[in-house]
Image: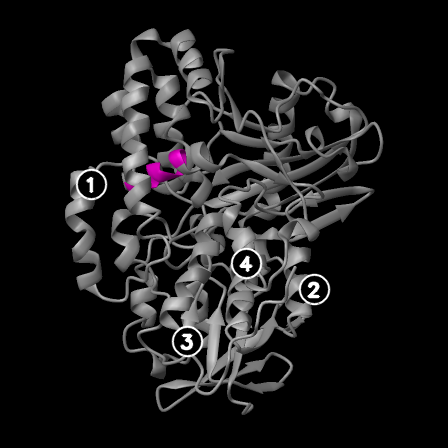
Amino acid sequence: MRDTQRTVVVGAGLGGLAAAIRLRARGHRVTVLEATEQPGGRASVFVRDGFSFDAGPTVITAPYLLQELFALAGRDWRDYFELVPVDPFYRVEFPDGSCFDYVGDEERILAQVRALSPRDVDGYRRLAAHAERIFEIGYLRLADTPFDSLSEMLRVVPDMVKLGSYHSVYGLVSRYIRDERLRQVFSFQPLLVGGNPFRTTSIYMLIHWLERKWGVWFAKGGTTSIVRGMVRLLEEMGAEVRCDAPVEEIEVRDGRVRGVRLEGGERIACDTVVANGDPVHVYGRLVSARHRRRHTDASLARRRLSMGLFVGYFGTRRTYPELAHHTIVMGPRYRELLEDIFERKKLADDFSLYLHAPTRTDPSLAPPGHENFYVLSPVPHNGSGIDWEAEGPRYFDRILEHLEERFLPGLRANLATSFHVTPRYFEDRLRSSQGAGFGIEPRLTQSAYFRFHNRSEDVDGLYFVGAGTHPGAGIPGVLCSAKVLERVVPALDGVVPLPAVPA
């Protein structure tokens, strides 16, 4: 095989690792280059004082996508990591003391809807049926379909119009549900992929049915166990995964990829690059402007970015067995808070939170008798100008105080370890433009054809996977982006795909 018949994957996030597995199975000679000291990208891990904290994604849905990857090499995914179901999927807590356990079983959902708002029982049935129709088109038909041309987009427009995709997620939910608390329960999901429920197209209601269909899962040992399993599989397949290898430039000549140059000066020749990173950063920092006719600096600057994330990690010397694995803590404001975050770029006095208690499912993530937590708050991205060096510690203390008052009595007296990350972490370490937590915002005008394409229009041989490209953020989204590559990356001349090794 010629040296130039090599594929370099830039970034070892879940999307990059999945792309490397799929392309290696097709016979590509694959090298994965990760800028940081460990694979995983957003799904890396922090180990502090005997506690293991997932740095990023914690909710596993559509596990069949992981099963597919290992089957490509004839392996059984269960030999690499273990998934366990989470029930309830999320417990949603409201300021008035009421709560809602979001689960997969419709009768359990209807019983809770009836308890909060009897008049919305039939409305939920109709909402769920609508979400299922959106899922069948928006996910089953389109999630792993490339949108390289406007004609491909136009073919699905009639179906999207028929399903009301011009509505926002919150707008669609409000057509069926009248109770404000239930409107929040069934509309917050776009926040899991970086979208404002009041601005995100209702096609993202597919998340509701995706969770209903395949459930919500947790990986024993944390999401990092999936990362380790994927890296191990790649090594068994003969691919190379290198950490501490930041790419400084994607080299282009005569309009196509010729190689990559690392920050230390090393050059790796290749004719295919798969970028598992924020496309705004990749185009703006790694590809010279003279090679970008479409994705100019001015065009990149017009992209609307998702919100930022503030994430606090802490371990306690006592346990809180009454908590659910996933808790959504709603604040006193919903629409107004999201306007502060997405539009006004203002750090508000109030907040809504996602509280993750993984030791509820896997006690091994903390020392015996201890508890492991992760609390996430949506905040403005770095375009806000917020001084996180000053505000970060104060903001974290306010969050801990709020959690202590409502859910975790004696929290601060029992802290064994704590630290936090801000949008600065996402910009500096993860190379996400403006520290946006999920890349570009999933508005209608930045979805499908209008999102960054999986195949670059500017550079032959350059492809994209991950949260910033089609179909979008979230673990199912980034894994599906790797499936898209099988439709857009040409087969290698004279190269036979690797035979699957029997499990």
**Looking at the picture, does residue 467 appear above or below residue 411?**
below
| Mark seen at residue 166 | 1
SS at mark 2 in the image: loop
**Looking at the picture, does residue 381 appear above or below residue 294?**
above
Residues at marks 4 and 3, CA–CA distance in whole angstroms: 22 Å
Residue closer to the observer: 262 or 89: 89
Disc tally is 4
Residue 84, x across and y down, in percent? 63, 36
Magenta residues (range): 203-209
Name the side, left or right, on which 432 lies relative to 202: right
Name the side, left or right, on which 118 lies relative to 3: left
| Residue bearing the label numbered 3 | 462
Of circles 2 and 4, the one toward us is 4
Residues tagged 1 and 4 counted as in contact (Cβ below 8 A) = no
| Amino acid residing under circle 2 | Glu
The answer to whether one can see residue 243 in this image is no
The answer to whether one can see residue 53 in this image is yes
| Residue bearing the label numbered 2 | 37
| Residue bearing the label numbered 4 | 69
SS at mark 1 in the image: loop
State the image quarter where residue 374 is shown.
top right
